[in-house]
Image: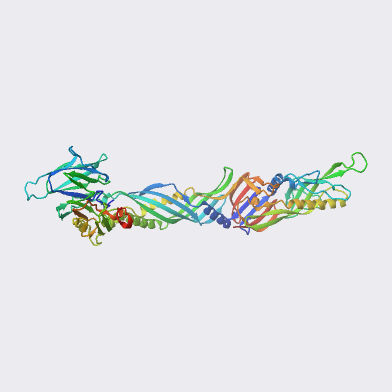
Amino acid sequence: MSLTGTHHVFASIDERGTNRALQAFFGARPHYLHYGSAPFVTANSTSVTQVPPIAFPGVPGGIAYAIDLTVPVVDLFPPDGPLPPPLVLGPGELSITTKVTITLGCVTGAAGGDRGHVTPVHTTLDVIAIADPVGHYFSPGVGYVSFQVKQVLLPGVAPASLQAVLDCLLEMILNGLLASVQLPFDIIDAGFVKLALEAGPTIAGNQIEIWGDVS
Amino acid sequence: MADSTAAVDETAANTLLHAAEAAAGTQTSPPGSGSLGPFSAHWSASASFAGGSVSLAAPDTVSIDNIQVSYSLNLSLGIDLSFLDFCLPQVCIPTPFGDICTPKICLTFPSINVPVSFSSSAILSADFGINVHLTAGTWFVDVVIQDVRKLDLGTAATALLLAIGAAIATALLAVPFIGPFLSLAVAALTAAFGLAEVTGLLGPIVSLFVSGLTFNVYQHSQDFQVLPASGPFDPAVDVTLVTVTAGVQATDKNELVLSVDI
Amino acid sequence: MNTLDSRFLRLGDCFAHRFSTPGTFGYALSPLPASLAAHHGEPPALAVIVTAADDAAGAQRQHYVTVSMAGGELRARPAQLRVTAGDLVIWSGDKSVTFAFRVRGRIGDEVIDSASLRTESVFTHAFGLPGTYEWADANGSGLRGQVRVAMPAAAASHEEWLSRLEQGTLVHVRGERAEPESVDIIVGQTVVWAVEDAPGVSITDATLIATGAAGAPA
């Protein structure tokens, strides 16, 4: 069976290539993985993104916090291994695995000599997400593939209600940072052709595939 | 499995080839020399390529039929006119100072250079192989001619023969005392060579552009910029094209496939 | 190349002079129209020695001097020529003269100069290319004329054409007037300008003469 099928051009990037592209992206722009308010992050840079603290009455300066993620690792359908239930990697989907470290700036109570001192407390959790590829096509050779997370699981979190809260939180966070992650058509076809998109992106055989014509 | 794979079928390969021909532009040969019958010939030439239809054959053959090779030739023929040498006869005429007779004056005709400009096209059908190479930090995928199946000059030799005859006649007009000899001279000179000699001159010149003919179908810096810089905190995102391979895969369609590891 | 200009004698041109009085014409040859001083008091290298005629009704003879170029120098053969008063001497170049030459010298008080024709001098030119040639005096007089050169008839054979080349055409220059002013010839034929009582003229293609205002020679 031909690669191009009923089209004239085919391009794909496999799982290893996708992960290498993600490593390159987050290696150059790590601030998409590290967020924090003062005092954890004092200014924006290529390494970190400053966010405002959570305002709360009676908490001077708001609640300080930080969110740090490891470089996400992608698994393209078919899955390399089973996922923790209820997650299932279906045809056309990809899974994203990362670790999130949530840090809270804990301010001590009214009594005691260290009243008002901020002490960071943190936890690191595994995060697994199911996402779809989304194609963005503008003109021949100009376009990219991004990822839209639709289901997140932080396994081992209890009770289930806390897990649901954190699942939703991480789904929002992952979609927020993945909005900036783009796989241009150029890296998928290595700049071989100016592809006019006609079909895809789809995921099969451990690769992201697109089809089209050449202009 | 390669990290990135791109494939084009024969239809898309035609588009890539035509773009490669246009990108190759007009190629100029170094000046050369040869002969045209008894006359010396010096020439410079240029050629460009267009059209043609691609068919692919595994593992790595790109056949291209009916490429139009458009060429321009600047030819300079060295022609010895000494065969026209003659003598002005003595002229005797009465003058107020007595009859005067000029001496017989013998004239030698110089060798002349006859410039000929000529343009035409030939049809080329050939098989090309695929050459992938990394040179000075850039990956190239070239199709390189391997076997010329046809190089058809068409009626160019006949047209060039006529053009040479016309150029000789024009050049001779400027030579003093040739005038009355002109038709004799042109006939004698053009009889010195014919279609075979013109083809023998033209064929090798056109073949110079065909020998080693290469079209570049892919070229990319080994340092591949995935995303450009965007703002002070978003530098460019780069990967390295570690390996590039190319070949023809034959299934229900024949496809030119480029495979890249990053 | 076949340029009409008596100041520069080329292959196909002749300069002739009738030496009517005895004396020695010492002269020099030059490739340039530079001023050539006649030699005084020393035997000239090139000379025409004119002796008195033996009898009043002596037949005029023609003498030929061939000019050639050897070792970068113009040479005349014979270098020394003895003639009788009334004879004609004709200078012409051979194939070795690839540029041009001028004859200039003095006999008694008379300067004889192929670039400045005065009297008893003849200039001939064989025309190699068709066209209409307006000629004039590059030395500034009002002398002018026209030579129309046509290609021979297509029907004419090569032999017919060669035989016609033996026919010359005379233009008689008296003072600043040419008679006839306009002549018609075919390619290869020779026009002979016989100059009499002129103020030192040249026969020059008008296109070669630099003009001042309103076409007058500069």
Q: Up-down: is B127 above or below C44?
A: below
Q: Position of residue A110 (x, y in %)?
A: 92, 43
The chosen color scheme is rainbow
Q: Nearer the viewer, residue A27 or A50?
A: A50
User: Does A178 sit left or right of C123 as displayed?
Assistant: right
Q: How many marks?
A: 0
Which residue ends up furthest to the top in the rendered image?
Answer: C42
Question: Residue, x 48% and y 52% (percent of image)?
Answer: B26
User: Does C117 sit left or right of B155 as displayed?
Assistant: left
Q: Nearer the viewer, residue A19 or A39?
A: A39
Visible in this render: residue B114?
Answer: yes
Q: Up-down: is A41 above or below B182?
A: above
Q: Nearer the viewer, residue A83 or B14?
A: B14
Q: Position of residue C34 (x, y in %)?
A: 27, 44
Question: Residue, x 41% and y 47% (percent of image)?
Answer: B32
Visible in this render: residue B177?
Answer: no
Q: Nearer the viewer, residue A54 or A147?
A: A54
Q: Position of residue C161 (x, y in %)?
A: 22, 58
Q: Position of residue C110 (x, y in %)?
A: 18, 46
User: Does C95 sit left or right of A98 as displayed?
Assistant: left
